[in-house]
Image (cartoon, helix red, strand yellow):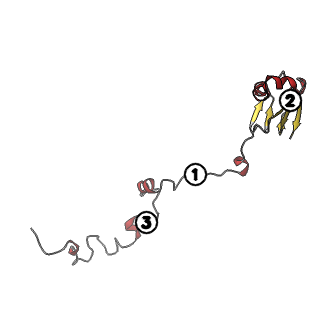
Amino acid sequence: MPHKERKVRKQRGSRYMGWGQVGQHRKSGGRGGKGKAGGRKHFWIRTVKYTPNRYRNKGFLPPSAKKPDAETINVGELNDLAIKVLTDYGVKGGNELDLTALGIDKVLGRGKINVPLNIKVAEITSSAREKIEEAGGTIIES
């Protein structure tokens, strides 16, 4: 049945407006805390939906971990690389294989080499140096 009274006029004559004691709905306890309180407790669904990264572990990386690792190559791979870069004639002629120009920073000692090569590189391990010099090659450190 229609009437003239608006909905907002409900309980205007009562003192407590349906909340029991005076002040029961007055402070921040009625809304679950101030600000972002309860984000891990009773407002967890709100946290997951609207601020999912709020409790993530960001972590810390020391500057040494941000430095890129050196590009490496093993002694055993130098034969194939030399044939690709210098061709078969250049390998027999004993030309210089410039690894720094190819973007390789360090030579490691795994594998065998049987071709004498003059290798230009920034770093080299002791076992790799031995193997290259045994094969009759030289190392030019840049």
What residue does disc 1 label? Answer: 57
Q: Position of residue 139 (x, y in %)?
A: 88, 33
Q: Is the residue 68 above or below the residue 88 in the image?
A: below
Dot in front, 1 or 2: 2
Q: Which numbered disc flags the more N-terminal residue, 1 or 2?
A: 1
Q: Secondary structure at mark 2?
A: loop
Q: Which numbered disc flags the more N-terminal residue, 3 or 1?
A: 3
Indicate the quadrant where residue 129 lies.
Answer: top right
Residue that appears at 42% across and 54% down: 49
What residue does disc 2 label? Answer: 95
Numbered-mark total? 3
Quarter of the rendering occupied by the C terminus: top right
Q: Secondary structure at mark 3?
A: loop
The residue most toward the left is 1
CA gap between label 1 and label 2 equals 53 Å
Q: Secondary structure at mark 1?
A: loop
Residue that appears at 76% across and 37% down: 102
Q: Which numbered disc flags the more N-terminal residue, 3 or 2?
A: 3
